[in-house]
Image (spheres, rainbow, N blue to C red):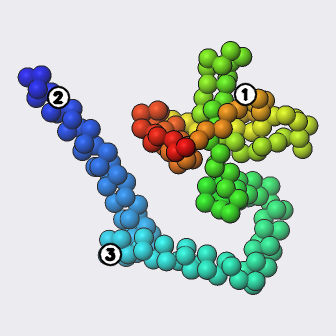
Amino acid sequence: MKRLLTYFLRGLILTVPLVVTIAVCWLVLTRVDGWLGLSIPGAGFAITVAGITFVGFVGTSFLWTQAERWLESLLERLPFVRLLYSSTKDLLSAFVGEKRRFDTPVLVQLSADGAVRTFGFTTQASLGALGLPGDVAVYFPQSYNFAGQLVVVPATRVTRLEASSSDVLAFIVSGGVTDVPEAKR
C-alpha cells in the first residue's frame, strides 16, 4: 500500500505542473481567439504576437517617437491614467527593456547579526536624490505570487550574488524549492 501511495504522489508531481501549464496556455489561446472572433485555436495568439512585433518595429521609427511623446504628454495630464501607464511601462522596461532593473540579485541582512537574510534585486544603487545617501532600493518578489515589496536598506547590508537574475527570481517565486544552478566562477 505504501508503494502505491508513493507512485500516486510521484504521479502528481509529474502531471500536475504539466496539466496546469497546458491548461493556462490553452485558456490564454482560446481567450485571445474568442476576443478576435477566430475559430482556429492559436490563430489569435499568433496574430497578437505578430501585431506586437510589428508595433515594436514601427516603434523604432522617428514618426513613432514623436507620436509616443505626444501621447505621453497627453497621459501625463490625467492623474490615474498617468499612474497606471507609467507604472506599467516602468515595470515592463525593468524586465525586458533597455533599462533593465532586475539584473542585480542580492542577499540582504535583515537583522544586525546577519542571521536573518532574504533575496532581492537592487533597483536603485543610490537614493541620494531622496535624501538617503548610503541607502539602496531593493525589490523583494513574493513567493508563489506576482507581487513584491520594495525596501530601502543600508548598502552595507546588501551582498551582490554571483548568480543569474532569472535563476534567483525562479528560486524566490518558487518559495525556495527550485534548484539554483552552481555559480560560475
Q: Earlier in the sequence, mark 1 or mark 2?
A: 2
Query: Residue 63, which numbered label?
Result: none
Mark 3 = which residue?
39
The amino acid type, in three-letter code, at marker 1 is Arg
Q: Residue at x 64, y 49 (%)?
A: 102
* Element assignment for label 2: helix
Query: Above or below — where is 76 with respect to 170?
Result: below
Q: Earlier in the sequence, mark 3 or mark 1?
A: 3
Where the C terminus falls, by quadrant? Answer: top right
> Which x, y percent locates residue 158?
70, 32
Mark 1 = which residue?
157
On screen, residue 129 versus residue 123, left or right, reads right
The amino acid type, in three-letter code, at marker 2 is Thr
Query: Residue 6, which numbered label?
Result: 2
> Which x, y percent locates residue 71?
77, 72
* Element assignment for label 3: loop
Query: Above or below — where is 165 with respect to 148?
Result: below
Q: Earlier in the sequence, mark 3 or mark 2?
A: 2
> Which x, y percent locates residue 183?
51, 41
Q: Residue furthest top?
A: 113
Where the N terminus falls, by quadrant? Answer: top left
| Residues at circles 3 and 2 in contact by the CB criterion of under 8 Å | no
Whole-Å distance between the Cαs marked 1 and 2? 44 Å
On screen, residue 15 versus residue 173, left or right, reads left
